[in-house]
Amino acid sequence: MAMPALLPGHHLQLLQGGVELFGAMIESIASAKHEVLLETYIFDFFGTGSQVAAALEQAARRGVTVRLMVDGVGTPQFPLEWRQRFDGAGVQWHLFAPLGRFGLLLPSRWRRLHRKLCVVDGRTAFCGGINVLDDFHDPQYGALEAPRFDFAVRVHGPLVRAAHDVISQLWWRTQALRKMRDRELAAAWESARRVGKLHFPDVDPDSGLTANKGLARAALVLRDNIQHRRTIERSYLKAIGAAHHDIVIANAYFLPGGKLRRALIHAARRGVQVRVLLQGRYEYFMAYHAARPVYGSLLAAGIELHEYAPSFLHAKVAVIDADSRQAWATVGSSNLDPLSLLLAREANVMAVDAEFARNLKARLESAMRTQGRRLDPTLYAQRRWSSRALDWLAYGLMRFALALTGKRY
């Protein structure tokens, strides 16, 4: 399927971390008059996560339609208190694809809802890599000394409609399937019918958001298992192939397939400066070790690899030729790894806008300069045999898992 066109008329605001994102989201939700739609992989009710939950509850109590979908792996259940509060307020919530009896033993269960999207009143959209999760708290590791490094973008403009429609379509499809399983055929038919007849809220003409006054050209680029199987990957390949000066990438789980690796290597060999900011702290065995066998070819091509260690790096962003008229940037949920590019539902905003790209590039360069550690190719090649063994074990397990899904990467 063709990639979505970059349309003009967008206002983009870069948001770093949950502190900036949740403040902006809560402000938008508090002023909502009609509808709040939210999808996320993780919804954790600790700290600032509870503030977002409270904003959803309050919006529903004043009559706003609130629909919340979370992934059944990222968020296997809600606390009883919040289930009761949401139900009492009228928040409509749904767990996407709970694991069931066999859990992740079934490869079909590896197709997760990983995108992070929010649309308020059809006027404002939020997209990025940030889960509803306190910046200074990790459900597995507890309190964090430094905030998680991640980004999102607030958007006004034409792509808000695309975000609204994709959230609504998945909502009504899952409702139809649930009603079918419960043998509520009339309700299932009604939910299926609504997929093709989505209602988009009327934008207030006094809001200032109806006119195409924005400078940025942007698009919502999706990855799913039906129409958009390779759209995000192809968008990256196209942008990398057109790079003239520099490429800066920050990616939490970085294990690019052959096409992406070759594209980055070719860019470096034709004189493009390529820098990648990677996860420097151990989080998961597979994510940490499986990526390292591909580092050697990248370092040999002159690509700079920097590891971020003050806290967990969770960003999925990139900037290309930020100082040119065709400055390209992306902020979203998609890692450059097999789970994101072959299996999960993902969403990225991709934009051509010099001011936005320069802002993102400056933040990434600052993180590399002050909080990153550049990998030395010689020392990397001389790392201990035990480390190399773990790396290749993880890489082999990843390749075996992909074979079970029938995917090539």
Image (cartoon, helix red, strand yellow):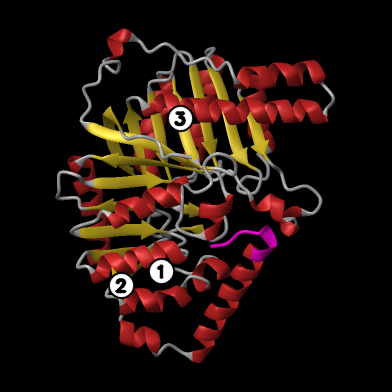
Q: Is residue 307 above or below residue 252?
A: below
In the image, taking residue 87 as reference, residue 263 lies left or right, namely: left
Please tell me which residue is depicted at 38% across the width and 29% down the height of the picture: 159
**Nearer the camera: disc 3 or disc 2:** 3
Check disc 1 and give the amino acid type.
Gly
Q: Disc 2 versus disc 1: distance between alpha carbons?
A: 8 Å
Under tag 1, what secondary structure?
loop
Specify whether residue 375 is in view. Answer: no
Where does label 3 land, which residue? 163
Q: Disc 3 versus disc 2: distance between alpha carbons?
A: 37 Å
Under tag 2, what secondary structure?
strand
Where does label 2 land, which residue? 373
Residue 279 x %, y %:
41, 65
Q: Disc 1 versus disc 3: distance between alpha carbons?
A: 32 Å
Image quadrant of residue 66? top right
In primary-sequence order, the first of circles 3 and 2 is 3
Range covered by the magenta-colored residues:
403-409
Question: Is residue 218 on the magenta stretch?
Answer: no
Residue 7 x %, y %:
31, 30
- The circle drawn on residue 37 is none
Residue 172 x %, y %:
64, 25
In the image, taking residue 224 as reference, residue 406 lies left or right, namely: right
Give yes or no for contact between labels 2 and 1 (Cβ–Cβ under 8 Å).
yes
**Nearer the camera: disc 1 or disc 3:** 3
Please tell me which residue is depicted at 30% across the width and 72% down the height of the picture: 373
Residue 376 x %, y %:
30, 81
Where does label 1 land, which residue? 280
Check disc 2 and give the amino acid type.
Arg
Under tag 3, what secondary structure?
helix
Q: Local crowd at mark 1 within 10 Å, few (<14), some, or many (≥20)? A: some
Please tell me which residue is depicted at 50% across the width and 84% down the height of the picture: 388
Image quadrant of residue 215? top left
